[in-house]
């Protein structure tokens, strides 16, 4: 079994003292995997990955990145440590051009590597090439998410952590985002993905966890989880119909 890139043990976190939102959640993300975190609204999915990323105070448990304890690491050190977090919103600078958005994301790279790395991102996300001079705020929703992901990937993170990259997008862009993530994973990048779009996320994921009331309630192989009755009841509020059988494959 491949090594854990991200190992989160019994994490507790919250915004105010005495009000835990994440209540003892544990997950493991192994090298090269896409791990999906599902769960009902308000389950604490965003809080969980924000806490991992240093953005919500942690009151208990541990976060290991590549074997190193990063539980107490401040958010601004995460990129250097190898964890790139793409928040659900406000993940680009809307008034800056696409090119400048990428350039300012290069912070930790050696100056001489930057031009080649920018070219690699344009090669990976050809849609962005035509738009390099466009203000990022004028991109389509799908292209905006592409730019946000490119900004995160440009520094070669050990793990890419994404909060609902398909949220608010039209169906066409939703499939574009999932295709993009599947492609990124093929290139060897490890991904932790929070999604509401359970079916599409499970279709590209390797394993998944269901978070309920701040705790991991259920874990499984992504392709099997869609048809798991426990998940259906916890998450979807119903058992999947016969017609949806194998839907995540
Ligand atoms: N900045 C904040 N300050 C205080 N409480 C917050 C804050 N953000 C979220 N919460 C609370 O934390 C709980 C979990 O919210 P969170 O956004 O993590 O859930 P979620 O699973 O991501 O939900 P969704 O599916 O709607 O994105 C909610 O009760 C929410 O009200
Ligand atoms: Mg959320």
Image (spheres, helix red, strand yellow):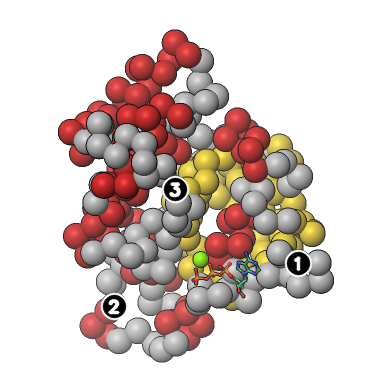
Provide residue 119's location: percent of width, then percent of height.
30, 22
**Dot placed on the residue nearer the N-terminal end, 2 or 3:** 3
| Mark number, residue 245 | 2
Whether residue 79 appears in this view of the structure is yes
How many angstroms separate mark 2 from mark 3 (CA)? Answer: 35 Å
Q: Earlier in the sequence, mark 1 or mark 2?
A: 1
In the picture of the structure, the residue carrying the numbered disc 3 is 91
Of the 4 image quadrants, the one containing the N terminus is: top right
Image depth: mark 1 or mark 2 in front? 1
N-terminal-most mark, 1 or 3 = 1
Looking at the image, which residue is at 71% across and 64% down? 15
Decide if ligand 1 comes within 8 Å of the CB at mark 1: yes
Depicted 76 relative to depicted 233: above or below: above
- Residue at (28% x, 72% y) in the render: 246
Residue shown at 24%/51% (left/top)? Answer: 140
Q: Is residue 76 left or right of residue 92?
A: right
- Indicate left or right for 229 with 167 as reference: right
Graded by Cα atoms within 10 Å as few (under 14), some (14 to 19) or many (20 or more), the crowding at tag 2 reads few
The answer to which quarter of the image holds residue 127 is top left
Residue under numbered circle 1: 16
Q: Badge 3: few (under 14), some or many (20 or more) residues near its Cα, within 10 Å?
A: some
């Amino acid at each position: 079994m491949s090594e854990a890139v991200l190992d989160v043990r019994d994490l507790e976190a919250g915004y105010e003292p005495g009000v835990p939102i994440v209540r003892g959640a544990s997950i493991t993300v192994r090298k090269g995997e896409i791990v999906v975190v599902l769960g009902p609204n308000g389950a604490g999915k965003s809080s969980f990955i924000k806490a991992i990323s240093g953005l919500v105070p942690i009151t208990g448990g541990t976060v290991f990145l590549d074997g190193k304890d990063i539980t107490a690491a401040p958010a601004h050190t995460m990129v250097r440590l190898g964890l790139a977090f793409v928040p659900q919103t406000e993940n680009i600078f809307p008034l800056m051009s696409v090119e400048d958005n990428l350039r300012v994301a290069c912070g930790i790279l050696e100056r001489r590597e930057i031009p080649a790395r920018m070219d690699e991102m344009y090669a990976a996300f050809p849609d962005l090439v035509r738009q390099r001079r466009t203000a990022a705020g004028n991109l389509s929703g799908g292209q905006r998410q592409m730019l946000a992901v490119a900004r995160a990937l440009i520094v070669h993170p050990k793990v890419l952590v994404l909060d609902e990259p398909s949220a608010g997008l039209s169906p066409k862009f939703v499939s574009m985002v999932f295709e993009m993530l599947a492609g990124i994973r093929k290139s060897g990048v490890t991904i932790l993905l929070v999604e509401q779009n359970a079916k599409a996320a499970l279709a590209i994921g390797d394993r998944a966890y269901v978070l309920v009331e701040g705790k991991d309630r259920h874990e499984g192989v992504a392709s099997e989880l869609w048809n798991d009755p426990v998940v259906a009841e916890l998450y979807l509020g119903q058992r999947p119909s016969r017609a949806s059988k194998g839907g995540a494959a």
